[in-house]
Image: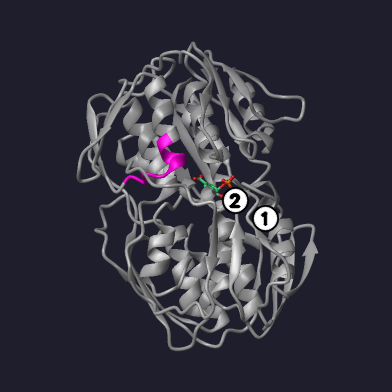
Amino acid sequence: MRPRPRKRQTTIVHPAGFDGGVVRVPGDKSISHRTALLAGISSGTSEIRGFLQAEDCLNTLKAMESFGARSWIDDEGVLSIQGTGGKMIEPAGPLDVGNSGTGMRLLAGLCAGSPITVTLTGDASLNSRPMRRIKEPLELMGAQVELTPQGTAPMTIRGGKLHGMEYSLPTASAQVKSCCILAGLYAEGRTTVLEPIPTRDHTERMLRAVGAPIRVEGQNISVDGYGPKGPKFLARPYVVPGDFSSAAYWLAAAAAIPGATVRAEGVGLNLRRTALLDVLRRMGARVEIERTSAPTDPEVYGNVTVYGAELKGTEVGGAEIPNLIDELPLVAMLGALAQGRTVIRDASELRVKESDRVAVMVENLAGMGVAVAEQPDGMVVEGPAKISPTKSIRSYGDHRIAMSMSILAIFADQPVTIANVACVDTSYPEFWEQLSQLGVKVE
Ligand code: S3P
């Protein structure tokens, strides 16, 4: 990764400006994690274009190296991963995966079926997030998972002979689903996971692309295990599309400025990720989508253009939530700019992300002069508000809070300083550069 000085705080100048334009965002984080895992257990060397070189995914890559894979990145940013052929060796010490829930939960599933003991740990945020949700299914399959008394990491997994199972996910979580499916690859027999609500399906798509025996029937996903020797996937080329969740910041900014336009090119358009576009339309913005991927590509991608408008409030909840889970801080901030009331419900999962995103967004919106009411499973935002900071804005070390509040700061009536923004490097190190490219004045 190019060395980049870590940014501690940022000030969005007043008037901030926002010219809009064309953006190409870096690679999808969820897909990059999964690519590192699958290429890491394949036989031979896979070449990956568009891999997200941000802290979270690089930590997952490092973890795969501790299991025996090798990796290198060339001058053009193409990542090569020489896989282990399915076998996982025991790492020399604990694996620190930093800030990433995806990294920790997917790696836990991947190593649970090998005869090794692995300790996974992370930063203070990750080590406070719930991990019983993966301990339970992994132990049902035959692994042993040790957590702190609070049910958090550091987590020690004693892998072993796994057997397939049928498991109903208590919460809609792609991370837990993927953890079970990856463990299922090393199990004897069939593992079936039942989702209460469909969540992002990158793992399923990628496994299908490498020829794994995976079947999706409605909300049931089944995989036939290869047993403790693990799957025999062959190395292959991968192309990671741009991250819709990163493009979302620019699309949301444009949506709230009548006359503004942003076009995000080469971005992932998986429907389980793009519900924000439906929300932007409901709020009054115009959205155009142009698919450029081939029908044979595992993932759909293309270009999205958003044309800004006077926005009106909307409600989000139910089955839509998993499809915009990481964009909910943006929906909340758009609610502050829209005419009328915006309601977010059925989103209690937001409370166990990199921060308690319900509490933190409520605190920060209130600190910007917005009338907002906290609910157990979401919030109610009244708009349009005069965006005027009355206190300092804090990210609580959560990248999506830091970026969402930076976008809201564009609309403020004075400069806004946001503290603790180094966390942006976990998912989107180019964020500040791209913010400036789109005409926003940043100090
Ligand atoms: C992710 C799934 C989501 C999402 C996270 C990435 C993934 O978490 O919030 O940023 O890559 O599977 P949950 O599955 O726990 O909701």
Q: Amino acid at mark 1?
A: Arg
User: Considering depth in this image, is 361 or 389 the residue closer to the camera?
Assistant: 389
Point out residue 47 in the picture as x, y percentages from the top left corner: 23, 38
Q: Is residue 225 left or right of residue 374?
A: left
Q: CB under 8 Å between callouts 1 and 2?
A: yes
Residue at the (50%, 83%) spot, across then down: 257
- Dot 2 beta carbon under 8 Å from ligand 1: no
Point out residue 271 in the picture as x, y percentages from the top left corner: 45, 61
Q: Which residue is mark 2?
A: 398
Q: Would you place residue 186 above or below residue 362 in this image?
A: above
Between disc 1 and disc 2, whose residue precedes?
A: 1
Q: Would you place residue 273 above or below residue 426 in this image?
A: below
Say which element carries label 2: loop
Examine the rendering and report whether any part of residue 130 can be seen: no
Residue at the (54%, 15%) spot, across then down: 159
> In the image, which residues are magenta?
51-58
Q: Would you place residue 353 above or below residue 176 in this image?
A: below
